[in-house]
Amino acid sequence: MGAIWGQNRRENPQGALAFLEDLLIECDAGVGETVLVGGGPASGKTHLQHQVVVRAKELGIVTLTAAGAADERDVDGGVIDQLLASPLLPPSLTGRPADGDGRDVDERIAELCSAIHRLARERAVLVAVDDLHHIDETSARLLLRLQRRAPSAALLLVLNHADGSYADSPFTSLPHRHVELTPLSVQAIAELVQGDGLPERIHELSAGNPLLVRALVDAHRGSADTGSAYSEAVQRLLHRYGSPLREVATAIAVLDSDVTTEAVAIVAGVDPLEAEASTGRLADAGLVAGVRFRPPAAAAVVGGLRGPEKVRLHVRAAEVKHARGLSPAEVARHLVAAGEAEADWALPVLVAAAEQVMLGDDIEFATRCLKLAASVAKARWEQQTISQLLAKITWRVNPAAAAPHLRSLREAGSLDASDRIGLARQSLWLGDRDTFERSFAALETDVEPLDPRTSAELILAGYWHYGVSTTTADPGDPWLHTANSLAAMWRTGGTETTSACAERILQNCRLSDTSLEALATAILALAHDDKADRAEGWCTSLSEEAEYRGAITWKAMLDAIGASLRLRRGDVPGAVDLGTRALGMLDAPNWGVAISYPLATLLIAHTAAGAFKDAAAVLRHPMPDAVWATLGGVRYLRARGHFHLATNRGLAAVSDLQQCRRILHEQDLELPAVLPWQADLAEANLGLGNTAMAVELARQSLAGPADAYSRGSALRVLALAGDAAARPGLLNRAAEAFKASGDRLELAKTMRTINHLSQRAERAGSLVKAVHVPRQGRSRPAVPRPVARPEPVASPSASVLSEAELRVAELAVEGRTNRQIAETLYITVSTVEQHLTRVYRKLGVAGRAALAGEFADAEGGQ
């Protein structure tokens, strides 16, 4: 092969390897050559050379290897020492030229060159040198001599040089081939790793840079963390570049946006020309696309910053962006990353940034901005402003943490409208009614009137928590008219009017801190008007939005409402599941007085399912004292009263339900649609055998402005307490009322009562018949027929067995032990024993065996 001067090839590392393997085969056949291999840092030169050396050894070619180093340029003959370290060379070649051996250096270089050349005429020889631009002068002279003689022997020189050093290299003046390494293509990467879209993804991340490609391929093959492998590869690449390119790369990554040459130069602390040149080299290496880092590369570079260097670079970046007039959020990101805000302009920028990012629901970053601002605030008004903003921001995810900021708002001498809205909003959640009403009143009398939509939202929030409105605004405004019409739901239940208003609120109020209860009221209004599908659809949609926007408080409350909707349509397991998850989203302090809502729903659901132990566990949850002045607290008391009623604790049930009445009367409230205390007390008195009182309360409930739900409850009590002949008709009317109210749980309970009442009457009649026909050899007094009572209401005093006694007797006949009966009915073992004693006495039987016989006779007579 003839001598070739500077033939240039552009190859990716795989193509270059194939080319060099061909030259190795030619060398083994006696053809010599010199190849200069160029490329930037991490372009694959060293890895390529290693592969060539391995292949040469496989072919039996003598290999002499060396590598230059920047810190060994002054070590005369250092590279020669590495080349001559091969054990395949004759002993005469192991010494290097030096001044102390009595021979001229040139003479010794010539002798070494001749010896290697003679060896190459006998056997193929590969001389491979990495980082040619770092070799010492004496070693370079030897390699130049070898390059001249390479074409006349089986001598192949593979010399790697740095990007940009080719033109000035003395080796270009002699015959040689030049290979410039290029990035790996998608096709080349596909030869290394297979997978659907994987080569394309790796190419996208690395731009074909061999070092980055290998890191990603190795991570994939070894199931390692791809992100960590990529980050480490980027750090190694920057380390190879050194200064000033590393500083420029770090500046570009830190800036992330507004990456101009001037900005990069200032942050990096280098000359603008150096910044521009370094940026070009970074683009060639595949780290930079245009003038910005590829996202994973930027994260890897910034992630490698530590301590003072990180602080210094981010502070410089903040200064540059502030001087260029970028947005407060852009500047604040660097101040927060540095953890410093010493400049005079830093505090207002941080406050403005917090307000700006809150529009996009970035609660976490807004909080970090304000906390950093608070650390440097000196003036009291500055501290007050920051506390006010923190109170608003923190509430969405951590209402309890907002309490200290709330105190700051209360203590403030003057508040603007935004501050008062925040104060009113959070006071409601924490049960501070006085502060809410004062803040709302101040908003309405402010110089700049409160906008109608916010006023409507706060009106409905007041109704939600306290059942009243404190507004004095003009009710003729469309917003306020809609709010007041919707609030009628608490008194009348669901109607066409309330449903229409509910839809308007849901369609026109964006989910926000002030609109949460307004939207919740609208959802319940639809549910009370037998529009369960619409109510649940809206609730689910808003819950998903709250989750997307990172507002845990909103989502917890909406899911608690969703649980109550499931309960209304009779899905008790679904209500328990969603209610439990909602309750777990916030701890007790963060729930504030609103914790009563999920707890009441869970209490009702567990009671309906007969899971009395789970219901009792709900009762152990802590609640703030302020809850008892809210409607949520009354709702919880009502749920607890029904739990006591279901577990044969009639007196405790009456106490809870009387307290409901007392709280409502003290606040001059009548809310039969959601808190039908008269019907509840009627049912509790019926359970205690106070039939006359139960009937009177039920009639009072019907005499008032009863909605469908309370009408159904009252009719059911009258049915169970009154004449047997009228009972079926009253129960059917109660079922129709519950159906109209949209409460499928109470409808199902009423239908079970109707069916159970019929079955119990048949069994009771058979039992009486069996008692009147005593067995042979035994006689006892006749027993009057017991009047059957549905669960959980007890029988009238005319019955032989009370409801509680009959329940215990039935379970005993089934073979359950006293303890099992106690656990099932959630009563004590002692109570079970007392009930059984009375059963034996009333029926004239000696014990369980005889009792079982009596019931068997009764069943057989049906």
Image (cartoon, rainbow, N blue to C red):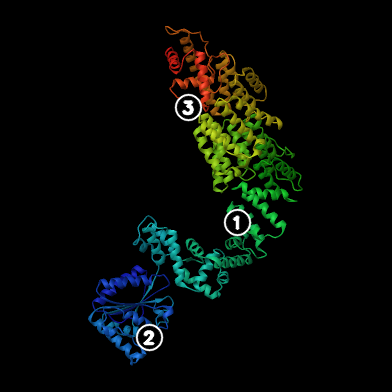
Q: Mark 1 — residue?
A: 368
On the image, the x and y values in percent for residue 629 come to 67, 36
Residue 682, disc:
none
Viewport quadrant of the N terminus: bottom left
In the image, residue 176 above or below residue 792: below
Q: Is residue 210 above or below residue 450?
A: below
* Other-residue count near label 3 (Cα within 10 Å), few / some / many at <14 / 14–19 / ≥20: some
The image quadrant of residue 596 is top right
Calculate the distance from the C-alpha at mark 3 to the C-alpha at mark 2.
100 Å
Amino acid type at mark 1? Arg
The image's mark for residue 138 is 2
Residue 614, image x and y in percent? 52, 34
Badge 1: residue crowd in 10 Å (few <14, some 14–19, many ≥20): some
* Near-viewer residue (14 or 766): 766
**Residue, x 40% and y 63% (percent of image)?**
215
Q: Which residue is mark 3?
A: 819
Point out the tag, 2 or 1, that comes first from the N-terminus.
Answer: 2
